[in-house]
Amino acid sequence: MMWFRTLLLLGFLLDVCYGYSSEDEDYYMQELLSREHYQRIPENGETPGRGIGKDSRSTSVKPGPRKSEKNKKAVKAADGVSDGSRASERVDCPPLGLETLKIDDFQLHASSMRHYGLGPHRGRLNIQGGLLEDDLYDGGWCAGRIDPLQWLEVDARRLMKFTGVVTQGRSSLWSSDWVSSYKVLLSNDSHSWVTLKNGSRDLIFTGNREKEIPVLNTFPKPVVARYIRINPRSWFPGGGICMRVEILGCPMPDPNNYYRRRNEVTTTDNLDFRHHSYKEMRQLMKVVNEKCPNITRIYNIGRSFSGQKLYAIEISDRPGEHELGEPEFRYTAGSHGNEVLGRELLLLLMQFMCQEYLSGNTRIRHLVEETRIHLLPSINPDGYEKAFAAGSELSGWTLGRWSQDGLDIHHNFPDLNAVLWEAENRNWVPRKFHNHHIPIPDWYRSENASVAVETRALVAWMEKIPFVLGGNLQGGELVVSFPFDRTRSEKLRHPTPTADDHVFRWLAFSYASTHRLMTLASRRVCHTHDFAKEDGTVNGASWHTAAGSMNDFSYLHTNCFELSMYVGCDKYPHESELPEEWENNRESLLVFMEQVHRGIKGVVRDAQGRGIANAIISVDGINHDIRTASDGDYWRLLNPGEYRVTARAEGFGGSSRVCVVGYVIGASSCSFTLERSNLSRIREIMQKFNKQPISTRRLRQPRPLDT
């Protein structure tokens, strides 16, 4: 029997070397490793590259079909990596989906694990660990034993053409753990394994030098198999065997694979699904503008630190002008330059709205004709260029996050929370201090303040246009965050609601509930928080306590209610994932825009019918007011119900009325006419004749008798 098995194995390997075996053999049992094609590994004394073997490469170039030759050469020159593989043998494949969670936990296995929080299900690229050691959601896979027999395995559940591996160390604030070299093994049945070879020797790939920067090793040739194992051979001496990985591979044709077909998400929208450089982004916006010139306008709100213009596109039936009674809405993205999904979603949204408007889509036409929409896809183009140069799998968790001068734009706004709460503690509100439109401190506007030029441009933009509702798209999670983002107490992660908490919760739920995944109870958590248990929404202060956020500033300094949409677990998904991510977010993007028409709206006028600017609109029971725009019109977001609303303005008497908000989308009309106050009339008359008012006290004094 032994000789018969040996002959079978030899015949099996011969089939591997010279092509696929006959069609009537088991498809999943074909061994497709060709050892003859692998190059010799260096002998003792030779200097290996970062990936050992002439054709194995460890680089930081972007995997995917859109590589810049200039970028590839520059990166390889910087890393000292020679490209020994022939172009005809190179195959660019997307990631399997460990980071995006397309690979589920049951497809990941390991030889051992230190504890459950460091199990194989945590061995995903860029997954973030908890703050504490031994956390249930820790930052990677860590083997339970420290020896060269450990492995992390991925079951693709179908034959894949594997082309490379991306690795990181463990995400931890307290530990330093990473694998510095490893082997790759492949199998079609998870029992018989073949090690990737270089000639007669096992290929050993160079891994990580620290725990956060991803390292890509591409295979000398694509290898077809179903299972792939990473076998660590060496690791950081002061730590353990810990890894986060992503596998690159192209699926082999298999129309009978039910698992794959069941999980595929396709789109029928004919849009430009790719990552866009700064130049490509400008060109795409220009194409949209040329296709829909009657409803679009391109403008810029300022420049980045390196001088790139911050382009926005306006979508409206009368672009370039504010229409009386029409609310202003904004979406922004890319405040963190490496969170690129939001940027691409806004580029897709502007294409989609243009196409659907031209095709007569009644929903889109109503949005465009009744709303002035502003889309700002890239707040931080400098940071984006850094992440874009590295690529979707190699930009890591932080590369490009900050502005060029090292500032976090989203948390670079003045801390108005502390100003308001101090005034409330002194009982200054509302007699001496307003509960809204809180002024910006003088120090913040000084040239020496640590304020990014991008933030200054945003502040000026927000003050210029009377936005009613806004959403800033971010990445790395699946949740909608609403203010406040700073805790009022000294506690960290403590819920701190606004006066409009009930409205913010509805707005957040309107986006989360229409997203394909956010409220799905069975979905896997992205990192450490299960937001699906909270309906896909969270109060910012109870999650990431931070002062000076864009959301808090917008609420306290302007009329705009701002929320943060974290639109995907993967900050920088591969280009192939964009159609699915568009389908995940498309309906949510539209539904959230429609919420700008929920509540009350109206115009505050004087007796002559002229609009009164900066009139204060107060709602009984809600300790947060808003103000009218320059033409006297206003919009106040409210949930369904009856509200007593008061309008008042300097020099005018106040006016109150009961306004009813219904359940159907469409703001209820609630306008006011204010009469001039007597004191205002007297002051106006005296000013007209250039005289000072006579004091009441002087009038009461008796006239002296004539002598």
Image: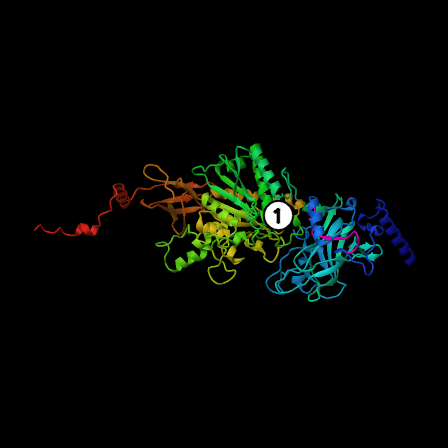
Judge whether residue 56 is colored magenta: yes
Bounds of the magenta span?
Answer: 52-64
- What's the residue at 46%, 51% (across, down)? 445
**Residue 139 % position (x, y):** 64, 60
Report whether residue 466 is seen: no
- Give whichever of 188, 76 is nearer the camera: 76
616 with respect to 346 (left or right): left
Classify residue 1 by image quadrant.
bottom right
**Residue 499 % position (x, y):** 44, 53
432 with respect to 30 (left or right): left
Judge whether residue 132 is colored magenta: no
Report whether residue 446 is seen: yes
Q: Which residue is mark 1?
A: 385
Instruction: Report the amino acid beneath label 1.
Output: Glu
- What's the residue at 64%, 56% (across, down)? 127
Q: Main secondary structure of the magenta part?
A: loop
48 with respect to 490 (left or right): right
